[in-house]
Amino acid sequence: MSTFVQMAGFILIALLVGIILLRAMARSSQVAAADGAERAMKVYRDQLSEVERDLTRGTLGEAEAERLRLEISRRILDLDKDSMSRRAGAPAPDRMRYVAFGVIVLAIIGSGALYLQIGATGYRDMPLLERHADADEVRRTRPDQATLEAQVAEAFPDRAEFDGRDELKPMVAQLRAALADRPLDVTGFSLLAQNEARLGNFRAAIEAQQRVLELRADAASADDRAYLLDLKVIAAGGFVSPEAETVIEQILRQDPVNGVALYFSGRLYAQTGRPDMTFRIWRRLHDISPGDAPWMPEIRSALPELARISGEPRYQLPPRPPPAGAAAAPEFDLDAAEQLSPQERDQMITGMVDGLLARLGNDGGTADEWAQLIRALGVLGRDDEAVAILQEARTVFAARAEDLAKINAAAEGADLQTPAPEAPFLQDQVP
């Protein structure tokens, strides 16, 4: 019922606004015309009075005074005739008011339809600070790890169906029994964690990986903790519990650019109503990750929408970075190419350039490959393409100072007259 009342109130207010605007337009045209005619009439009356005063003082002859009276009277008649022809209700002003009224009606209907499509009827106003406070409350009161695991186990009693499971079960049971007699075998517990996870025994896998961290103590790596984080989130059905958040904090203190921790940190904020923080974290993660990172498809798909929600409408998703360990393309023998005839040189380099252009556009590549492409385009005299590739490469490698230096060096070698960008200000820090 409250939603109906709100919509009825919106329609009533919109209609009142439309009526007020229409009346204002009608009155404004009438008042403007009346005010203009009245001012002109007052001027003419003052002129007639001035003629009579001049005649009385003797500064103006009777014949001249009569001529001026006639001229002023003629202007008064013309003004009155013109005022009548432009009075309110003439065809042209009416049409303009009808058009204006139609625009107002369309605006009212359109705004109502738009609100029904993208709005949230029945919701109260939620200022930014209040939304952040609500998000903090959701984060504070979210279920713990044990509760989430119990819910997932009840909903999905068996999440690990695969060929060879029956053969793996007895081997894992033997490993458990062996580790009962070897409580300090860190390698054995690491294997147990991996195989318990394969069987879908995520609680057992988590406990085994926690034992690995206990045994390795200060020597435990960020990747060891990242695997524990992964197990906790999988066991919780994809949700980041308070216990998993604690692991994220431990990882980021040890390795601020750990991809697993940054990915799940962004997911945590998305699950608790802070997409703006998710955008900041995943934007940074995209810039420092190789193109074949497992989270890359998800964050590339989400970043444009996250940017819109977060008030970053000008954000442009950069090209996908090259994969980790991408093989470098063979070096162009530019010195040898310079010794060829122009036609032979163009044919040789054009073939290599076109192939590299296609591969970098589809799969990405290393900084060395982008630099080679820039130099080759410079040799071919295709400066416009070289500048476009240079700008794209600077976007791809903006967060990698060493690679960006290679790109800028290639641009300088190709004599491209474009200034190198300043080092980006690292404002998107993980909280």
Image (spheres, rainbow, N blue to C red):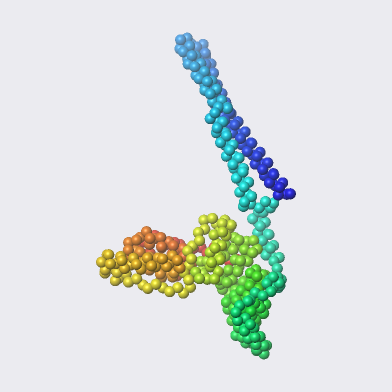
Q: What percent of the width, then of the height, locates residue 215?
A: 63, 83
Quadrant in which residue 8 is drawn: top right
Quadrant in which residue 308 is drawn: bottom right
Residue in the image at 60% along x and 31% along y: 27
Residue in the image at 56% along x and 62% along y: 302
Is residue 43 something one can see in this rendering? no
Q: What percent of the width, then of the height, locates residue 229?
A: 62, 74
Q: What percent of the width, then of the height, locates residue 172?
A: 64, 84
Residue in the image at 59% along x and 78% along y: 224
Query: Between residues 278 and 84, which one lies in front from this camera angle?
Result: 84
Question: Is 421 above or below relative to 368?
Answer: above
Q: What percent of the width, then of the height, locates residue 24?
A: 61, 34
Query: Between residues 107 and 421, which one lies in front from this camera angle?
Result: 107
Instruction: Kindly give the residue lying farthest to the bottom in the view shown.
Output: 181
Residue in the image at 62% along x and 63% along y: 270
Is residue 139 something one can see in this rendering? yes
